[in-house]
């Protein structure tokens, strides 16, 4: 009877997971529609129309509802398994996606007023949940090494830090796109790129050093052409093709599932197109750079604690604090890269794009450590592969 009850709870948890996934997907579309119904002025400021505001409010409500359903799914999964619900890759991916959504809603939308970036955070969460679906397993007991209170400390800290890094990655990637657009617009308009070392702040005239919105056409047309030109200087072809190819190759190599690979790659291509369209609506590059830096600076101590807690747990489980197991090595390498990113942001000559690429590399290392190491590399953490 108890096994039947647990199976029913596990099934209900999975249903709620899928419901949350759909809610996030519709909410993501709503956030991008909100961006589409936003007027962008020459100075880069934007004002949502009445339709845009209403769609944005509906998208926020749906994201909050999805998060509530998602939380219920995780709780029911824990009850069904009679343990903390983050002991395998499906559960970890689910919890990671929920935390990323919450960080986006609280930090980006509520605290910083950058709610129009939530569409990109939701896209990353949706991809994470889709990966989790490919690795689904029924709730059940875990191996003896995981039966420790340290799973609640170490894994929780790692999930929280990873969700913060996910939001930081979204800001970093958008910064690189926005910075490229601002530089190209400045070059084509015959102006000097007057941004700071951590991003683009303004475009100035070569003649007098004053702000210059001039492009082709008269002054009135230039008032609205300047921000929209940031979209025109970027290739609309590369934005869908590059993520499509990367995601397709990744899923084919990792899971060898052609249907899932095409579906995931198509979603990535759609997000790429939306990113191209959204460039004029994004905050200035300097703002995105600052958001990325502050989120990484906040998440880095949490990741450091997760690595330390993992070492203490390793001593309890295997009798040594550190043994350069593949997962331990990957975690440490990720820590070094994020430390390098923070150091680069404080070093003259390495701010801006150079530091941003280190941040991108650090996030890639984080994903490789979690997915590739668990699935392909044999080590003491191999039991967490599914």
Image (cartoon, grey):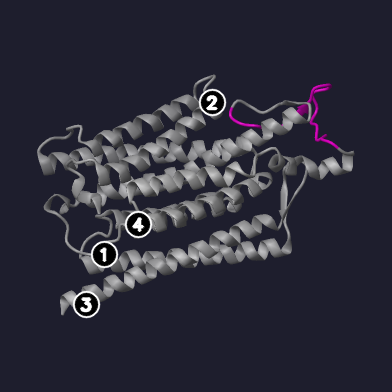
From what the image shows, is residue 113 above or below residue 139?
above
Calculate the distance from the C-alpha at mark 4 to the C-alpha at mark 2: 35 Å
Badge 1 vs badge 3, beta-carbon distance below 8 Å: no
| Residue 13 sits in quarter | bottom left
From what the image shows, is residue 37 above or below residue 201?
below
Calculate the distance from the C-alpha at mark 4 to the C-alpha at mark 3: 23 Å
Image quadrant in which the N terminus is located: bottom left
Task: From the image, tell me which residue sits under label 4.
Answer: 132
Q: Residue 78 carries which label?
A: 1
Residue closest to the eye, 46 or 241: 241
Residue visible at 71% across and 65% down in the picture = 51
In this picture, which residue range is highlighted in magenta? 198-216
Pinpoint residue 303: horizontal percent, then vertical percent: 34, 40
Q: Furthest residue to the bottom?
A: 1
Residue visible at 31% across and 66% down in the picture = 75
Q: Point out the tag, 4 or 1, that comes first from the N-terminus.
A: 1
Image quadrant in which the C terminus is located: bottom left
| Residue 343 sits in quarter | top left
Q: In this view of the protein, can residue 160 be seen by the observer? A: no
Residue visible at 37% across and 43% down in the picture = 367
Calculate the distance from the C-alpha at mark 1 to the C-alpha at mark 3: 13 Å
| Label 2 packing within 10 angstroms: few (<14), some (14-19), many (20+) | many
Q: What element carries label 2?
A: loop
Q: In this view of the protein, can residue 211 be seen by the observer? A: yes
Q: Point out the tag, 2 or 1, that comes first from the N-terminus.
A: 1
Mark 4 vs mark 2: in front: 4
- Image-based side of 321 in relation to 155, left or right: left
Residue closest to the eye, 375 or 193: 375
Residue closest to the eye, 7 or 216: 216
Pinpoint residue 100: horizontal percent, then vertical percent: 44, 52
């Amino acid at each position: 009877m108890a096994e039947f009850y647990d199976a029913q709870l596990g099934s209900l948890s999975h249903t709620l997971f899928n419901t949350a996934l759909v809610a996030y997907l519709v909410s993501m579309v709503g956030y991008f529609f909100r961006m589409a119904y936003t007027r962008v002025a020459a100075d880069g400021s934007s004002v949502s129309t009445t339709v845009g505001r209403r769609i944005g409010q509906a998208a926020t409500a749906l994201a909050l509802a999805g998060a509530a359903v998602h939380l219920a799914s995780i709780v029911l999964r824990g009850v069904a398994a009679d343990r903390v619900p983050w002991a395998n890759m499906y559960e970890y991916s689910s919890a990671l996606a929920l935390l990323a959504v919450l960080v986006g809603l609280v930090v980006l939308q509520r605290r910083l007023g950058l709610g129009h970036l939530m569409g990109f955070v939701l896209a990353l969460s949706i991809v994470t949940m889709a990966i989790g679906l490919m690795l689904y397993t029924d709730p059940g007991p875990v191996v003896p090494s995981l039966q420790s209170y340290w799973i609640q400390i170490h894994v929780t800290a790692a999930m929280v830090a990873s969700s913060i890094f996910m939001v930081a990655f979204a800001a970093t990637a958008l910064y690189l796109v926005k910075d490229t657009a601002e530089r190209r617009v400045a070059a084509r308009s015959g102006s000097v790129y007057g941004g700071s070392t951590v991003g683009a702040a303004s475009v100035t005239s070569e003649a007098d050093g004053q702000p210059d919105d001039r492009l082709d056409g008269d002054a009135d047309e230039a008032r609205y052409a300047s921000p929209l030109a940031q979209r025109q200087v970027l290739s609309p072809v590369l934005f869908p093709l590059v993520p499509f190819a990367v995601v397709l190759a990744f899923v084919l190599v990792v899971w060898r599932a052609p249907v899932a690979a095409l579906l995931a790659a198509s979603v990535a291509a759609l997000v790429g197109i939306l990113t191209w369209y959204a460039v004029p609506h994004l905050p200035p590059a300097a703002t995105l750079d600052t958001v990325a830096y502050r989120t990484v600076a906040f998440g880095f101590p949490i990741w450091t604690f997760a690595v330390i807690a993992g070492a203490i747990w390793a001593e309890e489980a295997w009798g040594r604090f550190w043994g350069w197991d593949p997962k331990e090595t990957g975690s440490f390498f990720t820590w070094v890269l994020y430390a390098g990113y923070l150091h680069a942001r404080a070093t003259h000559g390495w701010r801006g794009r150079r530091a941003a690429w280190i941040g991108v590399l650090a996030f890639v290392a984080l994903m490789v450590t979690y997915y590739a190491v668990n699935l392909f590399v044999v080590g003491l953490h191999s039991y967490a592969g599914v």
